[in-house]
Image (tube, grey):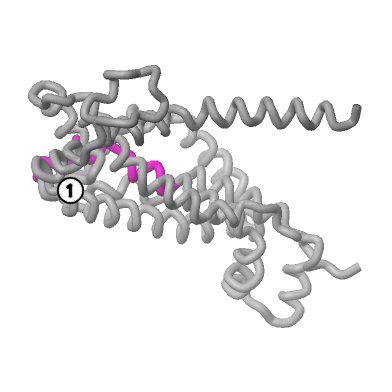
Amino acid sequence: MKTAPRVLSAILLTVAAIGFAFPFYFMLVGAFQENPTNSPTSLIPLSGWTLDNFLAIDSRIDLVGSLINSVIITSTVLLGTVVFGLLTGYAIARLDFRGRGVIWVLMLLVQMVPFQLLMIPLYIQITRNYGLGDSYLGMVLPFIINTTAVFIFAQFFRALPVEIFEAARIDGAGELRLLFSIAIPLIRPALVTVILVTFIGPWNEFLWPFLITKDVSLQPLAVSLANYITNATQSSANPNGAILAGATALAFPVVILFIFFQRFFRATDLGAAVKG
């Protein structure tokens, strides 16, 4: 009788996993089909496989150039988010200074403001005041500091035992040494979470790069694929295949990154660092 709940849980989790994974399976299979909606009841098509959908993308847009643009933009945002997030989160969580509570409240309030509400003022400021239109810096500047990353890092830093930092300070360690040698290795799951969340955001970002760039050679993959899909649905002989191929090309790097970092999602053994 004790195994019945486990079997039921396994069945429910399996059904939920299949339901979650099926749209991705349909997208991947449809991207290689001549007509993805020809046989919707066939889960494993035996014919109609083709690479023309991806070849059509490469022939109409600079796929490699757009991919490089996305990598540059995402890497820059990722670097800024991690560096500023770690420094700010550690300062808020572990340093005692005047105005710390006010900064924390303001940071939470900023999270409540939708980015779309700030988009027009940011566009005017970046393009007219700073002259950063059609530039990588103009695309990454609004995302270089992520309050969500600061919040995650601060919460994890607060969960660390105080005894670790007190012992290190007695041994003469400074705050930067505490951060890089003690705190960061103990919050690796948080660091991986921030990297994944930050990567997905700028990698899939469409509206801001589309608004800030007019030069096609600077547009990231999301914008280039959106323009291609818009034209392909009107002129392509296989519009559904073009849409699914574009979605697959955009989602593939994110899936690979998640698979690679999945092994780091485990609980951190904080108690092992404290004796007694």
Region in magenta: 198-215
Q: Is residue 129 left or right of residue 174?
A: left
| Residue 123 in sight here | no
Is 268 contained in the magenta span? Answer: no
Say what amino acid the circle numbered 1 marks. Leu
| Screen quadrant of the C terminus | bottom right
Residue 119: image location, x then y, percent: 28, 33
- The quarter of the picture where residue 237 lies is top left
The residue that mark 1 highlights is 63
Residue sitting at 62 percent across and 73 percent down? Answer: 181
Query: Callout 1: helix, strand or loop?
Result: helix
Q: Is residue 247 left or right of residue 260?
A: left
Which is more toward the observer, 62 or 131?
62
Which is more toward the observer, 126 or 74?
74
- The quarter of the picture where residue 121 lies is top left
Residue sitting at 49 percent across and 32 percent down? Answer: 21
Residue sitting at 85 percent across and 32 percent down? Answer: 3
Q: Check the image and report above or below for 2 versus 264.
A: above
Which is more toward the observer, 124 or 62?
62
Query: Residue extending furthest bottom?
Result: 171
Total of numbered circles in the picture?
Answer: 1
Residue 104: image location, x then y, percent: 57, 44
Which is more toward the observer, 34 or 132?
34
Q: Check the image and report above or below for 100 versus 240.
A: below
| Screen quadrant of the N terminus | top right
Residue sitting at 72 percent across and 75 percent down? Answer: 169
Dot 1 alpha-carbon crowd within 10 angstroms: few under 14, some 14 to 19, many 20 or more: some
| Residue 196 in sight here | yes
Residue 157: image location, x then y, percent: 66, 56
Is 199 contained in the magenta span? Answer: yes
- The quarter of the picture where residue 189 lies is bottom right
Q: Main secondary structure of the magenta part?
A: helix
